[in-house]
Amino acid sequence: MMKGGQMKKGDSPKETIKLLIVDDSPIFRQMINMILQKDPYLNVVGLAANGEKAMKLVVEQKPDVILLDLEMPQIDGFTFLRWLMAYYPTPVLVISSHSDGYTVFRALELGACDFYGKPSTNGVLMEQPKDLISKIQTLSGISKESLSKKYAKLARSKKEVPAPQPPKRREVLSRILAMGASTGGPPALVEIISNLPEDLPVPVVVSQHMPPGFTKSFAERLNKLSHLRVSEVDGGEPLEAGRVYIAPGGHHLLFEKRGSRIYTCLKAKTEEDRYAPSVDLMMTSAAEIFGAGIFGVVLTGMGDDGKVGLARIKKKGGVTLAESEETAVVFGMPREAIEAGVVDQVLPLHQIAEELTRYYRRFPK
């Protein structure tokens, strides 16, 4: 396994991953247990029906990854998460149905690393466990030490970090802000977007790797926490300054020009698509329309989505930024872009909103 939780395609983890399954449904616990035990590199070391039992198993077994259901009797998932991150920081994969989208994002803000949507039928999971196992493998690469640092308040204090240097002054300032993320992205996007000013003079477009059914809840939560108006894209909306457009799960967010205005358009995922929404496709489409007037940001996530998009932005003369390893839950996407030489600036998460605000304050009033 590679540093930062990113594995090369076809690789298997070299060491067995110890798993703890926490779910109040005995049927689901046993089904997940049966599926995961078939993988020679996964070892389920405990099954818990509630948070109290889960706490005991964490202390006794020291799992590498925890699969957590949020709705449980006695000590619920949120209380368990707070305790876990304070005393035994461990990568957590939230297991949730689509109807629980709002609670999933609360859990991610409390320290969970990623989530897996329960399929509508158990047969789907039995036949196609690849996505679940892939997420577990990714999370197993996140060290407990780095997880503790990244969610500690002191590590996020702006007072301890020198102010970032702005990029060189350009004749053309960005007319659109495009951001992409994957694993660890929802809380990172909350931190950035909730700290952007109400009078931001450009539209913000976001592609977050997320399955259908969750992006609407995510947009609604962001809307409540932000000064800007945030919504999931339906397709055909005109881009407006001070608004945030979230690409819907299972679709790519693209753009088209009609007369003097720019509109959103959606493209459905195909079997060949590795990521949907795709950061590369969104940024490339925006770069073709806005040219040098685009600011691209790639945040935490596994894989290399965003590298091609930032390269296109860079070629067009736009500005590019990537989250640093210091705060990225998974450093895969930022690292790929940085190593490709298409990133102008690398900053920790808690400095990005401040830098974006400073950059856009240079627009003439």
Image: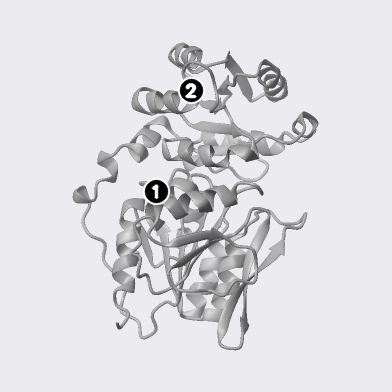
Please give the residue where the numbered disc 1 appears in the rendered image.
325
Please give the residue where the numbered disc 2 appears in the rendered image.
76
Which residue is drawn at the image coordinates 65% and 67% (left, top)?
Answer: 235
Instruction: Say which amino acid is labelled 1.
Output: Glu
Compared with residue 362, is residue 2 higher up or lower down, i.e. above or below? Answer: above
Residue 254 image point, x, y percent: 63, 69
Of residue 211 and residue 355, the one placed in the foreground of this image is 211
Compared with residue 175, is residue 73 higher up or lower down, i.e. above or below? Answer: above
User: Marks 1 and 2, how far apart in space?
Assistant: 32 Å
Q: Is label 1 or label 2 in front?
A: 2
Around disc 1, counting alpha carbons within 10 Å, would you say few (fewer than 14), some (14 to 19), or many (20 or more)? Answer: many
- SS at badge 1: loop
- SS at badge 2: loop
Left or right, residue 345 beside residue 114:
left
Which residue is drawn at the image coordinates 62% and 59% (left, top)?
Answer: 278
Residue 17 image point, x, y percent: 57, 25
Compared with residue 13, is residue 321 higher up or lower down, i.e. above or below? Answer: below
Instruction: Say which amino acid is labelled 2.
Output: Asp
